[in-house]
Amino acid sequence: MTTLLSRFSNEVPGVRGTDERVDKVAYARDLWPRHHLAIRSGAGASGPNEPGAIVWPESTEDVQRIVAFCNKTGTKLVPFGAGSGVCGGVLPGRDVLILDMKRMAKLVSIDRSAPTLTVEPGYMGLPLEDELGRQGYTLGHFPSSIVCSTIGGWIAGRSAGQCSGKYGKIEDMVVSIECVTGKGERLTLARRGHGPSLLPLVIGSEGTLAVITQATMRLHPKPVARAFAAFAFSSTEAGWEGMRDLFQAGMRPAVARLYDPFDAMLARQGTVKAEKKAKGPGAAAPGMGGSVLRQILRVPSAMNAIIEGLGSQVFGGALLVLVFEGEGAECEAEAALARRRLEARGARYEGEGPARKWLAHRYSVSYRQAPVFASGAFSDTMEVAASWSKLGALYDGVRKALGKNVFVMAHFSHAYPDGCCIYFSFAGSAPPGTKDGSWDEASEAVYDRTWQAALGAAVDAGATLAHHHGVGRSKAPKLAAELGSTGISTAKAVKRAFDPNGILNPGALFPPIAPDPYTKRAGTGPESLATDGGAS
Amino acid sequence: MNRIEIDRTSLLVDVAADVTLDELESTLSREGCTLYLDGASTSATVGSWLAEGARGARSPYADPADHLLAGFEATNVATKEELFVRAAPRKSVGPDLVALVLGMRERFFVVRRATLRIFLYDATTVNLPFVAPVDADAGDAERALLTRIGEELARAT
Ligand SMILES: Cc1cc2nc3c(=O)[nH]c(=O)nc-3n(C[C@H](O)[C@H](O)[C@H](O)COP(=O)(O)OP(=O)(O)OC[C@H]3O[C@@H](n4cnc5c(N)ncnc54)[C@H](O)[C@@H]3O)c2cc1C
């Protein structure tokens, strides 16, 4: 029997590939929490989403040959970085080829005069930053997933790192990219001072327009000094007003993270716990406490109301953590200036401790999903952004929408002169599924309802649906509500120009294709596009 | 909606494209704000200035946490459909459609309104010197792609 891999190997000799079951299972999905629900319920560990084969190009020429094969045979192609996406950006099917970029991971060059870095897309985040550090530089991009994501995935998803306050998001770091379009052309797209640039179309295109094969990125000198400070505020709003003041005054703390009172309380407690346990393997990290969560998830509305009622006083107020970094004493001076400005607004200085603790555990925070799912619950995060004048409505609207179904807390971790990102963390649960081997339907229903309500509230508040996780499949059902029907038709026109045969990552970003159960429940189908324009 | 709407909280101005930079700047200055342009032709309208690549605007590259054009409304030159890209400090919702208007000389869209970043006169401003390599000439493949985008947008309904 001819398989996809055998056809591929005949036509594109010399490119490694596999169709071993174990590999197909591993590449059947990314880390969209909705997949975890399916896995937990035992409904076919990967089932219909196992790809036909996985291939590993080693050069841009290989990518061009693979794209040519796909165009000729009508095979769909899904670029794959490290699979750490959390929105269902990677969800192949039996006749789909996965293009794993990890064998294209060379550091091509460092131009010390610019300074810039030219690198292949499969380079993993942490080793890249380590290598740059050895050479005296930093990219300045530190997503919490730095240990499990690639530079190609960052660019394809418009990722944001923890130090965005100083270095910006990934799109602010890209000088140029080389890519292979869905049509097969090899292009270099560069940032241009005053001319047209197609670069912003490919950045954030989630593998649907082109395969990124190389990137030239701006570098910064590796910081040699850091200054730390933390502040308590009487309310979350007072806290974000403080952040606004700093950023609009031209200050650029590398890290500025504001936790709402409950999240702040957990972070304060969590960091203490983490410090005690840090010596042993599996040391706990700050953030959501699994045992606390399990107790409260059955009654989310009541718990949200109680916590709201207890108010800021009980939890010690909202907490703002600041880290300044740079080449010398200016960090201390900036921290002192920030302190003067924030104290003048009524903030209480909490010393350096919380900021230092945050830095020590900066990558631990996000890895607590497994225990939550194992305990029969689910958790997820949602990162939306708006101008400062809309932030209050966004915070209230999304919290209210989420709070009916799940327990919710929030922090604000990417600020700009004109607005801010709100990062909601939520956890919920439902009675266990009843049918043997079936999906955990009750959990899925709660999960889908929660997302739809929260995305609707974000759109109503005038926000963007995603600040840095992308759209994938999880937000595609509501994309038309943000972009409007012309926005969608424009994006689709761009897609056709880059990828006339629609071979690249079908189903991601552009509605309508989505996994069936989600489509039925959440309205991801073509009909939802027709009816969902403009409002939600 | 007024031709010039200042959102002081967000330091943004929402402005009709036919307003001249001169008119905009004098309205802003009455509010203690500025576009902070360096050597831009002040008789140009906001729309034509954006179409030409917003010369004189502070390069967002100089301050990676900042940007120029937060959102816009525009008309597809071929289909006359109205596109509305809502203002946000940053986004991750697919291709950034700003690329279809900024510096594109109204090849695909004509801007009707724009939401621009403004500055307070008294703000300390960060100025990191960095010049991005500029590749002014599009190669053959990029030119072909630009043509295809135009063709596809002409039938984008
Ligand atoms: C614990 C945890 C913490 C996280 N924290 C953050 C965070 O702080 N900030 C943040 O921004 N994100 C975060 N994420 C989300 C995720 O890490 C990012 O979306 C990341 O950019 C994905 O990179 P990846 O290499 O894993 O890409 P993948 O998940 O493999 O792919 C993501 C998308 O990009 C496409 N793609 C990948 N490589 C290419 C390429 N070379 N060319 C074209 N398309 C390509 C894929 O088709 C897919 O659509 C987190 C995720 C987890 C699990």
Image: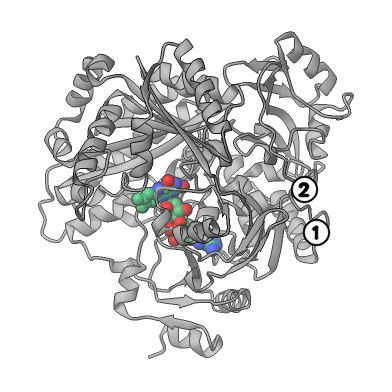
Residue flagged by tag 2: what amino acid is it?
Answer: Pro
Figure coloring: one colour
Amino acid type at mark 1 = Ala
Image point 79% across, 18% down: which residue?
B25
Residue sitting at 50 percent across and 48 percent down? A159
Q: Does A133 sit above or below residue B122?
A: below
Residue bearing mark 1: B138
Query: Is the shortest distance between ligand 1 and the CB of mark 2 under 8 Å?
Result: no
The image shows residue A32, relative to residue A275, as above or below, that is: below
Residue A493 shows up from this direction: no
**Pointer 2 indicates a residue of which chain?**
A
Residue with the most extreme top position = B30
Percent of width and height locating residue A245:
54, 19
- Disc 2 crowd rating (10 Å Cα; few below 14, some 14-19, many 20+) is many
In the rendered image, the vertical position of residue A242 relative to residue A10, given as above or below: above
Mark number, residue A196: 2
Quarter of the image for the N terminus of chain B: give it. Answer: top right
Mark 1 and mark 2 residues within 8 Å of each other at the beta carbon: yes
Where disc 2 sits, the SS reads loop
- Viewer-proximal residue among A209 and B131: B131
